[in-house]
Image (spheres, grey):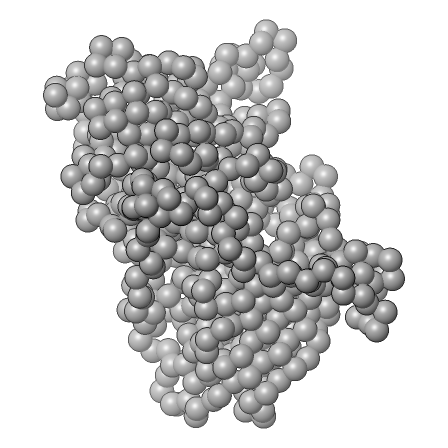
Amino acid sequence: MSGESSKGSDKMFFIIFSILVTFSQASVWDNLTASIAVVEYQPVYNNVTSRDKVIANSVNYMTQMYEIRDKTKIDMIIFPEATLGNNPETAVEIEIGASCTTTTICVDAQIHAVPYTALMFQTYVVVNLVEKSKCDESDESQNCKDYGFHFYNTDVVFDRSGTIINKYRKYNLFGERELDQPEQPDQVIIKTDFGVTFGIFTCFDILFKSPAQDLLNQGVDAVIFPTMWFSEIPFLTAIQTQQMWAQTHNVTLFAAGANNPAVGSGGSGVYRGATGAVIRDVIAEGGTQFFIYESKNGEVAPLPSEDTDSLAKQMDGFYLKRDPSIDDYSSQILNTSATTDFQTELCHGNETNESQICCNFTIKMSVVKPETDLNFYTYHLVAYSGVRSYDGVYNGSIDVCAVIACLNSSLSSCGERFSKYEEVQWPVTFEEILVKANFEKTDNRTQYPNSLLSSIRPIDASKTVWNAVNVEDTGTNLIERSFSIAESQNRLLTFGIYGRNFDLDPANSNDDDDDDDGKGFATSIMISGYTHGIMLSFSFLLVVVTLK
């Protein structure tokens, strides 16, 4: 429901299993009766003070909470990252256990409308803001020397009584130079009275082992994921990333995304692990919308059918970044004119290189003659294992085996999208795709099933098969990953395996420098954001009067 407004003959196979298994927390979800909302929210951008922006967004949050309450009795509402307060100027102190009431302000007057409304509606609420924490006198970090405080990107959880029951400080910062990284990643657990135990992490954290993957060892039933994502093709658009993570780890993910199409931010959803999404959307033309996950005795409405072409047209004006590491990939053009059946191996690196990868592709396709007056994509098979830069703020090691759409035969055209969808034709239909590769089996390597359609949504997980087989090769324990389609596809932009090798992330891999690139989510969104046209300058007292 929505509101208005993821060789060799000496190998020995000794364990075979499928990632597409019965959902691991079935006892929790099969009998659950609860309603949980994720909000895709477009912040207020204007020229008033930072404090007035926080007040304006706080009131808008309150409005969303009223609209959600009008739809159904709600148990939890999740708001995205960096859309309430996103700089140290409006930072607040957070005390776990503090209670907000009609007469007591537990956080700060500028955002009191949020916990106060949570109290009125008797619902859990998750918000993201900038927290300040007093420094020890001996602390020589820059913010401590300049201000006497640490500043953190912090998720705050209020319970039904308006009490702060937990907080999570984002560990893997995306630039965000004005903020501090916690000394250690937190593993935050949130137990609710409706029976679901949540973990929580924020945005860029999803691409790292800690805290995101380590959190799963704590027995959580689901993960809360506030984010301000900047979508990048071919592998890391917002919904694509959310689904691949939930699918490979077989855990429910509640993702609330900030919305700003001008910088590529948008994409929210609810993903039931390996079984796929039940809610997913991006407000492509800008705006705010909530989505409600409703479970009644374990019964949940399936993902509605999607009109791929209609959604794709809406994405024409949505900014999409390009992964610059594509230029370093090994590549082979898929010859759609010579054959309809195709099988090959493509490698990157060499045997003496610990980051070598060999990808095996099996493809069956049917092709119609393209019209001369319309564009069509050229497909490349690609392989890569090595270090890439994430917007100049972090260097991380990735593994790639995939089929990707390109504008032409040049690798430099891959990761680009034709600007007008109505001028694109799709002469290639993939009847079968199987992508397979071996990886060292270790807790510090993870692989994800990764796909993308022209709508900038992934193929629904139920229409793919994601498998793993444990393999021994000359005394080395490997895992053979395979990803295949279960139904033919003819609007394909990406299909393959995307992996992270945390062992090969360079030491001190934060790649920040002193120029203006890579300032991170909190800063760039304010610079690139456009004016929302709302000028609000009023006191907290007026907010309380409105609530009453």
Camera-side residue: 398 or 245?
245
Which residue is painted at 36% across and 33% down in the image? 194
Which residue is painted at 49% across and 45% down in the image? 25
Estimate the x, y position of residue 113 in percent, counting from the top left.
24, 24
Q: Quadrant of residue 105?
A: top left
Up-down: is 395 above or below 165? below
Camera-side residue: 234 or 156?
156
Which residue is painted at 20% across and 41% down in the image? 72
**Quick check: 378 left or right of 48?**
right
Estimate the x, y position of residue 416 in percent, counting from the top left.
47, 67
Up-down: is 102 above or below 425? above
Identify the image quadrant of the C terminus.
Answer: top left
Q: Quadrant of residue 311?
A: bottom left
Q: Quadrant of residue 337?
A: bottom right
**Quick check: 231 left or right of 212?**
left
Which residue is painted at 33% across and 14% down in the image? 99
Estimate the x, y position of residue 176 in percent, counting from the top left.
50, 34
Up-down: is 388 above or below 149? below
**Looking at the image, which residue sits at the far top?**
137
**Quick check: 400 left or right of 368?**
right
Numbered-mark total: 0
Estimate the x, y position of residue 19 in percent, counting from the top left.
58, 58
**Quick check: 52 left or right of 126?**
left
The answer to whether one can see residue 266 in this image is no
The answer to whether one can see residue 78 in this image is yes
